[in-house]
Image: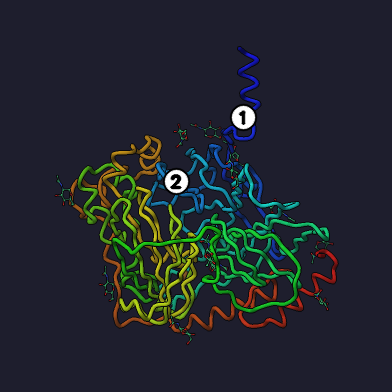
Amino acid sequence: MRLLALLLTAGAGLTQAARVVYDWNITYVTANPDNLYERQVVGVNGKWPLPAIHVNLGDTLVINAHNALDIPTSLHSHGMFQNNTPWMDGPVGVTQCAIPPNYNLTYEFNITQHGSYWIHSHYMGQYMDGLRGPLILHNPNETYTYDEEVIVTVSDWYHKQSSDNLNTFLNVANPTGAEPVPQSGIINDSANTTFSFTPGKTYRLRFINISGFSTFYLSIDNHTLDIIEVDGVSQNTHTHLITIVSNHQNFASSQDVGMQSTFDDFILVPLINATIPEPDQSVNLTFNFDVTTDGFNRGMFNELPYLQPKVPSLNTMLGMGNDSNNVDVYGPQSMAYIMKHLDFIEVAISNFDSGNHPFHLHGHTFYMAGRGNGTWTGDRSSTEWSSNPMSRDTILIPAEQYVIIRFRADNPGPWFFHCHIDWHLESGLAATFIVAPDVAQQRMTLPQAFKDVCIAGGNPSEGNAAGKEGLDLSGAPSGITLLYDGFTAKGKGAMAACIICALIGIASIIFYALSDPEKKAREIANAKLQNGSISS
Ligand SMILES: *[C@@H]1O[C@H](CO)[C@@H](O)[C@H](O)[C@H]1NC(C)=O
Ligand SMILES: *[C@@H]1O[C@H](CO)[C@@H](O)[C@H](O)[C@H]1NC(C)=O
Ligand SMILES: *[C@@H]1O[C@H](CO)[C@@H](O)[C@H](O)[C@H]1NC(C)=O
Ligand SMILES: *[C@@H]1O[C@H](CO)[C@@H](O)[C@H](O)[C@H]1NC(C)=O
Ligand SMILES: *[C@@H]1O[C@H](CO)[C@@H](O)[C@H](O)[C@H]1NC(C)=O
Ligand SMILES: *[C@@H]1O[C@H](CO)[C@@H](O)[C@H](O)[C@H]1NC(C)=O
Ligand SMILES: *[C@@H]1O[C@H](CO)[C@@H](O)[C@H](O)[C@H]1NC(C)=O
Ligand SMILES: *[C@@H]1O[C@H](CO)[C@@H](O)[C@H](O)[C@H]1NC(C)=O
Ligand SMILES: *[C@@H]1O[C@H](CO)[C@@H](O)[C@H](O)[C@H]1NC(C)=O
Ligand SMILES: *[C@@H]1O[C@H](CO)[C@@H](O)[C@H](O)[C@H]1NC(C)=O
Ligand SMILES: *[C@@H]1O[C@H](CO)[C@@H](O)[C@H](O)[C@H]1NC(C)=O
Ligand SMILES: *[C@@H]1O[C@H](CO)[C@@H](O)[C@H](O)[C@H]1NC(C)=O
Ligand SMILES: [Cu+2]
């Protein structure tokens, strides 16, 4: 009998689910990734960069987090659906209270997806201080063949602490909302990373954008890239140039010549064709930046900045009985939208700003269904609809255009929808999609640890957005509203151009941040190639 059991175990070896445990003591570390300035960063177990997490589809991932910082923290596994475990999602104020200093919280969830993802702090601007790194979910039954895989992260880098930058950004002295300018662009957390390739081999490149603010365009001279996965969704596009919108794309490379200077997300084609039904429910969002009554320049949906409720929306959702079906309990400025279980949702997002913004939805991927110039007017005939849309969890919405996304509300929980430029998130450019509170209550109970973490930090663990019962919302965060005669953020375009130039000046090498200077980028790429460290 023993032998039989052993044989059965061995036979099932490849598909055996494992419990993969990481103990993360979140600590301050000093680091100098751009060789220009040594500073305090947020690392793990006394080290920075963070170790990449590797786990297989079907495994259970456990991260025992201990907060050894003197400020709160949290961890978000970016792109994970967290179906049935919404408390493991990580955004402070949405699915949990922040982990206070000298406190432990265990994140544990089943891996039901595969692909290249990342994990990052979802507290204030903290991930820009370094608390972010690759989260690689391997498919034991890999469908692609390649010789080797390489993780490539791209990020901007600041010399100041995010808290200092945030104080400068959200400040009455900054009415135009000029964002802090990063000092460097780094690849794999260094300004001098060398990747070695052997001619003739096929590589899976796992590109992960762990940037806080800046946009990166990348290409490899004389190579086209086959995009095989975007945000964990398999797909099939051949391209010279890609953008990675705060996430994760994978490539196998093959040879060709040339380079483009723009990338259009809508050219992405899913490996499995999409047929998308007409929506059951629609939500309209517009967004812009303006000065609010507190004197700060804030980003906001529908003219109201997101203000974090006193009680996480998840605690409210699971703890308030039938009242959780009433949108008011989530707070006047949680920008909450209740969505019915299994409805097919359409969200039209109009960008009134003169910059591009990457929007990320937690808990789901969505179809990039349509787009158009100017503002969504409800006129479906003037909208450009995709016949076979790619789905992903982040989309860049270009200046003064609108985008229409659609998704199935099949994942009960409160899911954050926000600009992934961390400064804009902190200033209020966020909404909460409250999916199926009734079904959530039937299926799940909030683990005690996610009530305790609130109490440990001195916060209420239950009730509505004000920490009160029923519809008594007195004391809920509110009242920061649009100031109609304020400044507008016209200076932004110019500022963005400066940032991009600064990055090009410093950034390495094969990959480059781009506004126009294709020539310069080619020079950078050529210099790298002449160094002989990349070959084909
Ligand atoms: C966490 O790391 C800090 C800094 O290295 C150390 O002082 C502390 O003892 C560690 N805590 C735990 C629980 O390992
Ligand atoms: C918290 O985590 C640290 C580091 O893993 C561990 O040493 C400590 O015992 C934990 N404390 C509690 C109360 O679980
Ligand atoms: C993971 O999956 C197993 C088996 O389906 C289940 O028993 C367990 O509760 C799940 N764990 C989590 C954290 O969801
Ligand atoms: C492995 O992938 C192949 C190709 O997609 C599929 O046909 C097969 O069913 C998969 N096997 C398992 C055990 O998932
Ligand atoms: C980059 O790293 C290489 C070694 O990998 C070293 O020889 C070279 O001096 C470094 N360049 C700079 C600018 O730091
Ligand atoms: C890039 O970073 C990944 C993940 O941290 C690491 O596995 C890999 O070795 C790094 N590669 C280089 C060339 O630094
Ligand atoms: C990368 O992430 C940053 C920060 O979220 C974002 O501004 C940018 O649009 C993302 N995408 C690209 C292509 O760099
Ligand atoms: C998928 O859609 C493409 C067009 O985007 C079409 O050429 C192809 O035949 C479709 N494949 C299947 C299996 O329907
Ligand atoms: C439950 O809440 C919904 C929405 O607030 C309301 O329409 C409905 O009447 C309530 N049902 C009960 C039984 O209270
Ligand atoms: C938006 O404007 C651009 C430039 O004028 C044009 O090429 C594009 O077709 C327009 N898109 C739609 C959906 O009208
Ligand atoms: C969304 O906006 C369009 C255009 O103003 C309007 O026709 C439509 O009714 C709105 N939908 C909702 C749900 O508000
Ligand atoms: C790219 O290929 C062309 C044609 O083979 C060659 O002339 C050129 O030098 C190559 N560029 C680089 C940067 O290797
Ligand atoms: Cu933004």
| Residue beneath disc 1 | 12
Placement of 346 over or under 45, stated as above or below: below
Question: x, y percentage for residue 10?
Answer: 65, 26
| Residue beneath disc 2 | 82
The 10 Å Cα crowd at callout 2, few under 14, some 14 to 19, many 20 or more, is many
Residue flagged by tag 2: what amino acid is it? Answer: Gln
- Residue depicted at 68% across the width and 81% down the height: 518
**Do we see residue 531 in this rendering?**
yes
Q: Nearer the viewer, mark 1 or mark 2?
A: 1
Question: Mark 1 or mark 2, which has the lower sequence index?
Answer: 1
- Residue depicted at 36% across the width and 70% down the height: 348
Task: Answer with the quarter of the image where residue 216 lies.
Answer: bottom right
Placement of 531 over or under 67, stated as above or below: below
Residue flagged by tag 1: what amino acid is it? Answer: Ala
Element type at marker 2?
loop
Question: x, y percentage for residue 416?
Answer: 40, 57
**Do we see residue 159 in this rendering?**
no
Position of 149 with respect to 456 (left or right) is: right
Question: x, y percentage for residue 286?
Answer: 35, 73
Position of 422 with respect to 475 (left or right) is: right
Asked whether 475 or 418 is in front, the reply is 418
Label tally = 2
Label 1 vs label 2: CA separation? 26 Å
Asked whether 390 or 44 is in front, the reply is 390
